[in-house]
Amino acid sequence: MTVESRTTEPAGRTSTLATLVREFRAAREAKVKTNFFGYVFIAPALILYLVFSIWPMFRGFVMAFTDYRFIYPKTLWAFNGLKNFREIGSDKVYWSSLGISLRYTLMVIPASIVLALFLAVLISKVRHFAGFYRWIVYLPVILPIAVTLLMFGQFYGEKFGFINVNLRQLGVAKPPNWLGNVRYALPCVALADIWRGIGFPTVLFLIGIYGINAELYEAAAIDGATALQQFWKITIPLLRPTFLLILVLSSGIVGATEQMMILTGGGPQNSTRTIGLYFYQVAFQFGDLRMGYSAAMALSLGLVSAVLTTFWFRVLRER
């Protein structure tokens, strides 16, 4: 190798390295600028989320360990440790309301899943106007909850309700007061809630069914499997992740509040006073508005939902 080549080779390497460094710095600066404008665009949504979601949750968590009463603002930071939670242990109304909530949950979730799966299978078999049927099933979900429940309140009316008017025409002299009877009130509210929310699990089941390879059904049919056997051996096992998703998203039904507030107000005889309605009443209606104790009940309800979610994951988790 000549002296000239040995002296020019390091210079070439140095220029190449300098070029790579300049390109890296330029790419990094461009990325920083891109990220900056991205943060600017998401800033309004992020601020709203922090103000109206994160901050209330944090404040509610802190309030659960205080004796805050709305009528006495000075009690906002009156920390009382675990006193609220000890009181929950001896609060008979709390446990009664929690039992009603669990009964309501067992009414709504299984019926919703079975009916949604049935509708999803039917719609998946439709060749024409399937989009229209999907829209019809999902329509109640996008309606305001107050509109839906007020409509059902008119259906359940004792004197002029749609159901009782038709029952009288059929010869029933004294049709029941659906929302005023301890026996019927909770199932009637559950029926309204099922109708209102059935579209969401139906769409999720449809997504899962459409994602199943059609060749599996063809192979099963060739082997002589009936439609019912294909449903139990192919559709149900492959929809297990969808079942898990629906169950997890439905766990919040334990804290149902609006349904009872609009239709029954917790009556008759507190037979529909769920735990969500109870801690709402404690915070905004009863006595000196004990928001601290209400926050503690809400936190305990969150733990109940977490336990339910963990249970669903352990039962239906993928292996």
Image: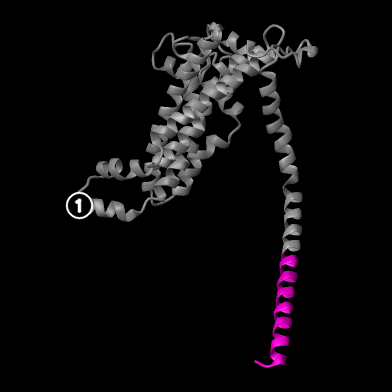
* Residue at (48% x, 9% y) in the render: 181
Compared across the picture, whether 173 is left or right of 87 comes to left
Q: Examine the rendering and report whether any part of residue 185 can be seen.
A: yes
Main SS, magenta region, reads helix
Q: Which residues are magenta?
A: 1-27
**Residue 31's quadrant in the figure?**
bottom right
The stretch drawn in magenta includes residue 112: no
Q: For mark 1, what is the residue?
A: 223
* Residue 202 versus residue 145 in the image, above or below: below
> As rendered, which of 136 and 93 lies closer to the eye?
93
Query: Could you tell me residue 12's position as x and y percent?
Result: 71, 82
* Residue at (34% x, 42% y) in the render: 237
* Residue at (68% x, 15% y) in the render: 292
Query: Could you tell me residue 32's position as x and y percent?
Result: 74, 58
The secondary element bearing badge 1 is classed as: loop
Amino acid at dot 1? Asp
> As rendered, which of 177 and 36 lies closer to the eye?
36
**Residue 77's quadrant in the figure?**
top right
Query: Could you tell me residue 216's position as x and y percent?
Result: 30, 53
> As rendered, which of 126 and 9 lies closer to the eye?
9
Compared across the picture, whether 165 is left or right of 69 comes to left
Compared across the picture, whether 203 is left or right of 12 comes to left
Q: Examine the rendering and report whether any part of residue 261 can be seen.
A: no
